[in-house]
Image (cartoon, grey):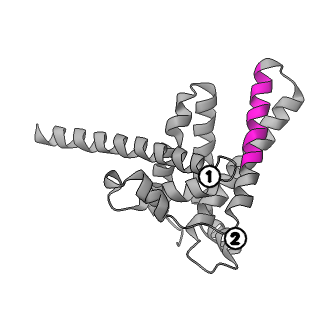
Amino acid sequence: MTRKSSHLIEVVNLVYTVVKGSVLFWLALLSRGLVYGWVFAIKVILQYFASDNPQDIRFRDFIKQVEEVAYAKVISAMMTFFFSLGLTGWLLSLVNISQLSFAMFYIGGLAWLVWLVIVIYYVKTQSSSGENQFYQSLLEIKKDFQKVIFIFLLAFIFVWLTLTKTMLGWLLFPGIYFYLVGRIQKVQFKGVKS
């Protein structure tokens, strides 16, 4: 009986951590005005899941502790553009199916997903030298290419499910996705040196 109750407690703590991570992501994104907040929000949620005890973290204190990332506003503005392009294409395809709406959706959506994966590695390599940070993140992507493909496909699946099933998924998507990204980055694949 105690083993079942301890598993139940672990599951409840995991759900709480994921939901709290999602709320933290959206608060961080909104705190930077949505357009310029993508990189900051991604860094906040990655640090949240990397912390030793995320259940005890207070939102306000945690957001204030996170350092700025170089070129964050430029990269976030590009991500906002691609996100808006994809969302506009998707909404147009719901009203009037045309080649233009599908092109907008696929180009915007795929570009946003690619930038999402790049930003994950860009934030991860931030502690390295500031001048070549983007280059260092591309080298890290090349080194962890299997993980990058897996992270990209995971994001693709989550976005597809949230668009086709429920918009409630957008509220929980960041927490679940970045929790899994943190777990994937800890995994060592066979035959791959990290």
Task: Tell me how many marks there are.
Answer: 2
Are discs 2 and 1 less than 8 Å apart at CB? Answer: no
Residue 74 found in image quarter: bottom right
Secondary structure at badge 2 equals: helix
Residue 170's spot in the image, x, y percent? Answer: 56, 35
The answer to whether residue 29 is seen in the rendering is: yes
Extreme residue toward the left, this view: 1
86 part of magenta stretch: yes
85 part of magenta stretch: yes
Which residue carries the number 1 mark? 32
Crowd class of label 2 (few under 14; some 14 to 19; many from 20; radius 10 Å): many
Residue drawn 72% across the image and 47% down it: 80
Residue drawn 41% across the image and 58% down it: 61
Amino acid at pointer 2? Phe
Residue 35's spot in the image, x, y percent? Answer: 70, 48
Q: Nearer the viewer, residue 92 or 158?
A: 92
Secondary structure at badge 1 equals: loop
**Label for residue 56?**
none
Residue 161's spot in the image, x, y percent? Answer: 59, 32
Which range is magenta?
Answer: 80-94
Residue drawn 75% across the image and 30% down it: 90
Left or right of 111? Residue 34 is: left
Extreme residue toward the top, this view: 95
- From the image, give the main secondary structure of the stretch colored magenta: helix
Residue drawn 11% across the image and 41% down it: 2
Left or right of 111? Residue 58 is: left
Q: Where 33 falls versus 43 (above or below)? A: above
Q: Where 110 falls versus 73 (above or below)? A: above
Amino acid at pointer 1? Arg
Which residue carries the number 2 mark? 134
The answer to whether residue 187 is seen in the rendering is: no
Residue 62's spot in the image, x, y percent? Answer: 43, 58
